[in-house]
Image (cartoon, grey):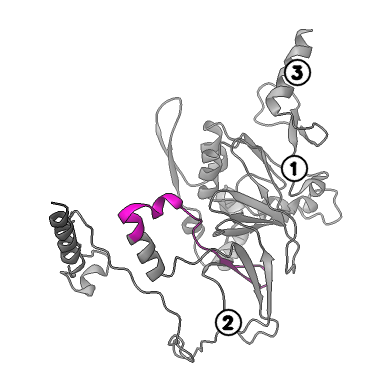
Amino acid sequence: MLNRCTVLIAASLVSACASAAQLPLSAGVGPQPELPPPKTSVVPLVKVATAKGWPAGAKPVAAEGTTVAVFAQGLEHPRWLYVLPNGDVLVAETNAPPRPEDGKGIKGKFFKHYQKKAGGAAPSANRITLLRDTDGDGVAETRSVFLSGLNGPFGMALAGNTFYVANADALVKVPYSPGQTQITAAPVKVEKGDILILHTGYHRYYEGCPQQDLVRYFCMHPGGKLPLLEWMLDMQIKWFGIDCGSGDHPMNTTIRFMRRDLRKQFEDTVGMAVEEFFPSYEYTHKLSGRKVKNNVFPFHNYAFQEGLIHAENVGGDIEKVLNTRALIGAFPWKYEGLESCPCRIIAFYDCGKAEVEAFRGMATLKQRT
């Protein structure tokens, strides 16, 4: 009986893998692609492309009037690119972290086989490499390990002087200085339930500062998009602070209507309309159940009702606490009927390992006594 079952399984595998496409390639292209009906089988069809590098001397065919050059080679499983403002190119050399459970049984054997065929079986380098083209010839002359000791790094983003990396298990951040070729600071992990202070560097343009530029401060600062807001909600961030004029990007507020000149400047920079870069979003009003569709202020209208509030115009000694973990205290003035008020934010470092809940309990006890 055992032998018979083995033969049947083998026959099913041959049958499934022998299946071929029933429609021409052109049928799946265009605004209304023709899709075949779904099929189910004990053993699904598996057709994995074999990963292989370019042969020596070979390269993609360039569009007329352009050329293709090898910018860099010898990288270990490069997965994602990010270009810094100065033109430096960052490459995430990464692979999926080990998953021991996926390697068990018959399914695990096939998984390993196809992972190897697709080029995904190599261990992860877990680093970000910096490539710099110093003379503009399309070839990187400088190459350095920008950040190491990561865990399956993929997405990267620079906000002001803070560099964020999406590891396989966490979002981490490190301080960054323009032109820097290597970061030696240990990444700080953002954990669930944290208070998050975002440093863009725009606090230096506030009124009274040596570099005062209020238009830049209020109307040209960086800001997150909806995926950042959804990530904050998923991470249960208690609240966040930011060192510029708004928790929303200026072009994701009514400034886009009031400053048409800045709107055009922004659209020329990103190469698309504001409405395309910051699309509309929808949510359900918590109290009334009304369906809301809006095109501005997601970090206000949507986030506030979800319990995620923020502090704007954070400044002071913010640069002294970058890339650190601390207990954060926020002490607003008490007003009735206002939508916002002045607030002093303090980072406490001399509190040992005590958690916020412990300090809350101590404060309650003092009030009672």
Please give the residue where the numbered disc 3 appears in the rendered image. Answer: 362
User: Does label 2 or label 3 sit earlier along the sequence?
Assistant: 2
**Closer to us: 365 or 257:** 365
Residue lying at 32% horizontally and 55% vertically, measured from the top left: 107
Magenta segment boundaries in residue numbering: 82-109
Above or below, comparing residue 246 to residue 186 in the picture: above
Residue lying at 43% horizontally and 38% vertically, measured from the top left: 283
Q: Residues within 10 Å of mark 2 (few under 14, many from 20)?
A: few
Percent position of residue 65, x then y: 48, 91
Percent position of residue 189, x then y: 65, 47
Q: Is residue 100 magenta?
A: yes
**Closer to us: 15 or 244:** 15
Residue furthest top in the image: 369
- The quadrant in which the C terminus is found is top right
The amino acid type of the residue labelled 1 equals Val
User: Does label 2 or label 1 sit earlier along the sequence?
Assistant: 2
> What numbered label is drawn on residue 132?
none
Q: Residues within 10 Å of mark 1 (few under 14, many from 20)?
A: many
Q: Is residue 15 magenta?
A: no
The amino acid type of the residue labelled 3 equals Met
Residue 228 shown left or right of residue 343 in the figure: left
CB under 8 Å between discs 3 and 1: no
Tell me how far mark 2 sits from mark 3, CA to CA.
59 Å
The amino acid type of the residue labelled 2 equals Phe
Residue 242 shown left or right of residue 348 in the figure: left
Please give the residue where the numbered disc 2 appears in the rendered image. Answer: 71
User: Does label 3 or label 1 sit earlier along the sequence?
Assistant: 1
Above or below, comparing residue 43 to residue 298 in the picture: below
Tell me how far mark 2 sits from mark 1, CA to CA.
41 Å
Please give the residue where the numbered disc 1 appears in the rendered image. Answer: 314
Q: Secondary structure at mark 2?
A: loop
Tell me how far mark 3 sits from mark 1, CA to CA.
27 Å
